Image (cartoon, rainbow, N blue to C red):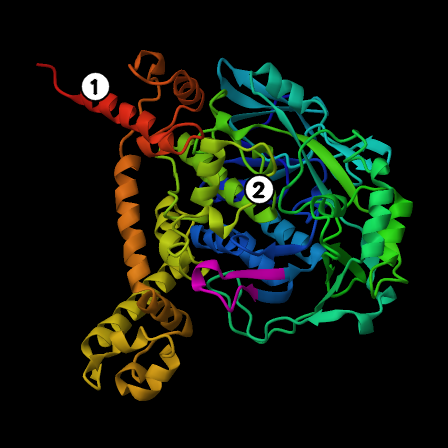
Amino acid sequence: MEEPTFDIVVVGGGHAGCESALAAARLGARTALVTIRKDRIAEMSCNPAIGGLAKGQIVREIDALGGEMARVADAAAIQYRLLNRSKGPAVQSPRAQCDRRGYARAMQKVLQHQENLSIIEDAAAEILTHGDRVAGVRCESGRAYRARAVVLTTGTFLRGMLHLGSRTWSGGRFDEPAAERLSGSLQRLGVRLGRLKTGTPPRVDGRTLDYTRLTEQASDPEPVRFAFDSGGEPFDGVSCWLTRTTPAIHEAILANLDRSPLYSGQITSIGPRYCPSIEVKVVRFPDRDHHLVFLEPEGRDTHVVYCNGIATSVPEDVQDRIVHGIPGMEGAKILRYGYAIEYDFVPPTQTQATLESKVVSGLYLAGQINGTSGYEEAAGQGLLAGINAARALAGSEPVVLRRDQAYIGVLVDDLVTKGTEEPYRMFTSLAEYRLLLRHDNADRRLAPVGREVGLVSDAAWSRVREKERQIASARAVLRCVRRGGRTLDSLLRRPEVTWQTLVGEAPDLALLDISDEAARQVEIETKYAGYLSRQEAQVQRARRMEDRPMPPDMDYSRIPHLRTEAREKLARIRPRSLGQAGRIAGIGPADQAILMIYLDASSAPAR
């Protein structure tokens, strides 16, 4: 039988795989998405929520670049909240609770109607190569799919092992098989693997909760949606609910700690630092008499409620005591117990900033296989991997987003430069230029990149250009018009003055044709002008280092005065620039100075 041939094969139908397959197909590459079960494509394995601190920025960046997650999240949203609303704009982030099945159905529909994309139900077992270059994948069925590039987005499926009390079983999710053979194929190619752990909490029947003992968290009345072209139609939000654990629950957990896979020695890999299991919280914070529990509906037409905050893998009887000891949950019916999962990942210093493997040409990696956690981090990587795989086949320059350009740029740079030994989660604190990387200006930052790539439509591009025109017009009026001897620009910088109050006092602004979104941008950038100017200056200084390329074949052993540790780390990571070299853990300013001197001497003309 003739082997099917594609330009690109994407392995895995999670959030990274969906964005990767769509990007590649939309850029004209004949693409196949290989996944174990078609009906589980875009499954929200953990909490059915999109966005959150820094994650909301990533979703809006995906939208600005021409990706799909923002649109699907808006289509499936049942609650919106803008986090950190009372704080500065640099740390505000949109979040949406979504309908679990609605999200998956919406994304599956997009994939099914995408030209150049075939969806294949099979399990990848082997990476095929020709020399040191990828040549396709062979599946468990024995069928081979030839391709010039392969994108691996395997999530938690690489030799996945589930844990519930003392019970263990193979699986990529609760009721899906693991990819058992693919890890061995990667190792035979010389790819080094590691092992990580994540977990999920129990789900309960919302009809069995006592809402009189819970604190309501309503949806924002005027939601901040993810897609920049979303309309302002009314939104009927669903409430989430808040409760907390108790000292009695903590005592029960501690009394049964030897039955927890995390403390019995059954689980040996490292879990997420910032979303730990409830037993880890109790041990790590012994002085806390409670931990918050967020009860979040999984959809409008289901009674399933996700118990955010009590992820666990303790036995069922201990989970019963935990759940039924929480105020408002005394009579809760548990629909599914929490569990933990261990899985293989590829330590990401083996991957380039394009997300192409350093070991096998044409092999790209995105999502949890790179050591990240979260739907948003996965989708951002998937989009970038799909773009770069397609551009490589077309002979175009790759897209590498800078740290001052996008949270996705911070994410990828952190991974490939510093690596990770635990599931990586994005936070605003990880972005040194976070005032520049706000959620509200993601379209202005990244739509030009998406347009150049070919993923931003004419309509979206026209909208961004019109927004820029409105902002420029408003700034011109602010600089030129005076009230009481002061320009409107200087008045707007006062903390107590908002755009709306200024419009009421200045008819010139009232006459402007400007959207609320553009006006908000003008207000933020006027009030924070001094901080923005300083960050821009920092960016320019850092960019001089980023513009100094490091030869990919540089022999670090021949550089005089460079420390042995620095030589070893530089040789392993092979930074693309002097700036990236300085961000490698263990590379100090003196090492960077030596590299600069060496580069200057190497580029100097011979006498």
Residue 63, relative to residue 5: is it above or below?
below
| Mark 1, other Cα within 10 Å: few <14 / some 14–19 / many ≥20 | few
Q: Secondary structure at mark 1?
A: helix
Q: Residue at x 36, y 32 (%)?
A: 582
Give the class, few, some or many, for how many residues have Cα within 10 Å of label 2's Cα (few <14, many ≥20). Answer: many
- Residue 602: which numbered mark, if any? 1
**Is residue 25 something one can see in this rendering?**
no
Q: Amino acid at mark 2?
A: Ala
Which residue type carries mark 1? Answer: Ser
* Front one among 224 and 488: 488
The residue to which callout 2 is attached is: 16
Quadrant into which the C terminus falls: top left
The picture quadrant where one finds residue 465 is: bottom left
Where residue 130 appears, x then y in whole percent? 51, 15
Residue at the limit of the structure toward the front, as seen here: 287
Name the residue at 58% across, 28% down.
346
Q: Earlier in the sequence, mark 1 or mark 2?
A: 2
**With respect to residue 80, does 376 lie above or below?**
above
- Quadrant location, the N terminus: top right
Q: Quadrant of residue 271?
A: top right
Q: Position of residue 475 (x, y in %)?
A: 26, 71
Start and end of the magenta stretch?
Answer: 82-96
